[in-house]
Image (spheres, grey):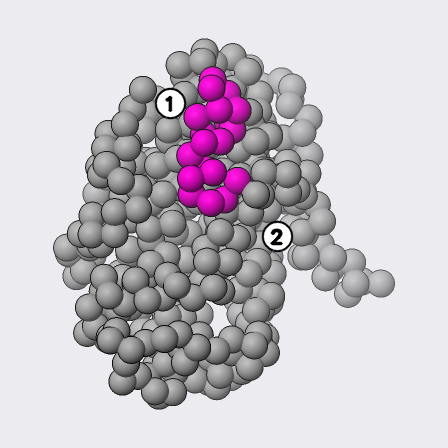
């Protein structure tokens, strides 16, 4: 059995020192090269033998949208105003509510917390942008490596979706926000691991189940919370696509996992655990604290105490845990992954709706079109 050290590179999952020691050492790099392993597979079996994937493919074709013309890009965005309006609308008193005596925030007033809110938004959207590019690359890889024709068809539509997502987040950052952040080192490690793995189903597990499962939850949270109409609409549309992507992962892996041995399933459990921890680590926003020149470890220590932070952090797993359960990963073997998710404090989501079918209710693009033509 693999140890924490073998999976994560550290013995204790919550070792803050070790987590923060992982940083992006080349923030000016323009290109990042990763060896993409795995075989490109031709199939001569063109039979449409997987109707659930076929249905998803038809839905994807009908739900395409245009990033340039389907969103209200003429919306004026005053970032500081948005940060304040969001805090007011959601009853958030993040900074001032904490006891900051003896911490890096002791002298922080409203102006500093406002500036933090702005940077935090720049950082969050930047990480979404980089994650979307990861999805674009992973999905292009799935087109090559998955052995089933129905899955190749579907994955091709997802490549288009992800190009559009990269496009909308890049445009929003450029035109509406006030700065970009380079990719977070934990997210980068995870994306590299997914792309390097030669087993085609690991691309799905890492991307469609873990990264996109988390993205769907995070987008949903921000979409509910934001008072900014352009971002709200943008996230609604991106989420319609993401729900299909996660469903694609669940439907494909459900079939494939049935033929795996217990040992092979254990490797998938370990990969899911690694991905979960890397994604949790990235949400510590270490680059934002760096931006303000405060001691990152002290800062993280303080914000981890904020109750809404804990809620947000665990909510990120609200799609991942039920989907892992549906795939049989929670309880396979001796329930190894259930134990790990319990330690991470996210097991309470196990009976929430999984995403195998949920995508049709999240198809906002089709709903808008039906409303417009009625
Ligand atoms: Fe995406
Ligand atoms: Fe996606």
Coordinates of residue 316 in the picture (x, y in percent): 49, 51
- Where residue 297 sits: x, y (%)? 23, 62
Left or right of 114, for residue 357 = right
Please, is residue 181 above or below residue 3 in the view? below
Mark 1 CB near ligand 2 (8 Å cut): no
According to the image, label 1 marks what residue? 267
Image point (57%, 43%), residue name: 348
Q: Is residue 339 magenta?
A: yes
The crowding category of the residue bearing disc 1, from other C-alpha atoms within 10 Å (few below 14, some 14 to 19, many at least 20), is some
Q: Furthest-right residue in view?
A: 374
Is 185 magenta? The answer is no
User: Does residue 15 appear in the picture of this structure?
Assistant: yes
Q: Which of 110 and 75 is in front in this view?
A: 110
Q: In which quarter of the image is the N terminus?
A: top left
Name the residue rendered at 47%, 64% in the picture.
307
Determine which residue is flagged by label 2. 240
Q: Which residue lies furthest to the left in this view?
A: 25
Is residue 341 found left or right of 13 in the rendered image? right
Residue sitting nearer the eye, 252 or 305: 305
Q: Where is residue 180 in the image (x, y as percent from the top left)?
A: 31, 68
- Labels 1 and 2: the sequence-earlier one: 2
In the image, which residues are magenta?
Answer: 329-347
Q: Can residue 118 be seen in this view?
A: no
């Amino acid at each position: 059995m693999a140890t924490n050290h073998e999976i994560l590179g550290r013995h204790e999952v919550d070792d803050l020192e070790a987590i923060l020691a992982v940083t992006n050492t080349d923030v000016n790099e323009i290109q990042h090269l990763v060896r993409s392993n795995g075989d490109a597979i031709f199939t001569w079996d063109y039979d449409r033998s997987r109707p659930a994937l076929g249905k998803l493919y038809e839905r994807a074709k009908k739900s395409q949208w245009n990033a340039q013309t389907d969103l209200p890009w003429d919306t004026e965005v005053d970032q500081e105003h948005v940060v304040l309006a969001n805090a007011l609308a959601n009853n958030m008193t993040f900074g001032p509510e904490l006891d900051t005596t003896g911490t890096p925030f002791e002298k922080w007033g409203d102006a500093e917390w406002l500036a933090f809110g702005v940077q935090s938004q720049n950082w969050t959207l930047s990480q979404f942008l980089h994650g979307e590019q990861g999805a674009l690359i992973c999905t292009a890889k799935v087109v090559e490596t998955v052995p089933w024709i129905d899955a190749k068809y579907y994955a091709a539509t997802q490549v288009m979706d992800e190009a559009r997502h990269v496009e909308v987040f890049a445009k929003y950052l450029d035109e509406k926000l006030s700065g970009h952040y380079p990719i977070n080192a934990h997210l980068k490690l995870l994306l590299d691991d997914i792309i390097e793995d030669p087993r085609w189903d690991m691309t799905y597990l890492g991307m469609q189940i873990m990264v996109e499962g988390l993205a769907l939850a995070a987008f949903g949270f921000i979409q509910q919370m934001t008072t900014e109409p352009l971002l709200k609409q943008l996230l609604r549309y991106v989420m319609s696509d993401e729900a299909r992507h996660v469903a694609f992962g669940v439907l494909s892996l459900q079939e494939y996992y049935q033929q795996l041995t217990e040992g092979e399933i254990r490797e998938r459990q370990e990969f899911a655990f690694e991905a979960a921890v890397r994604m949790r680590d990235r949400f510590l926003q270490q680059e934002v604290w760096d931006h303000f020149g405060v001691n990152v470890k002290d800062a993280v220590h303080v914000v981890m105490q904020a109750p809404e932070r804990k809620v947000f952090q665990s909510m990120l797993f609200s799609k991942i845990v039920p989907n892992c359960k549906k795939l049989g990963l929670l309880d396979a073997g001796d329930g190894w992954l259930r134990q790990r998710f319990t330690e991470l404090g996210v097991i309470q989501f196990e009976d929430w709706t999984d995403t195998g079918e949920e995508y049709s209710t999240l198809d906002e693009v089709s709903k808008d079109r039906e409303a417009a033509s009625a």
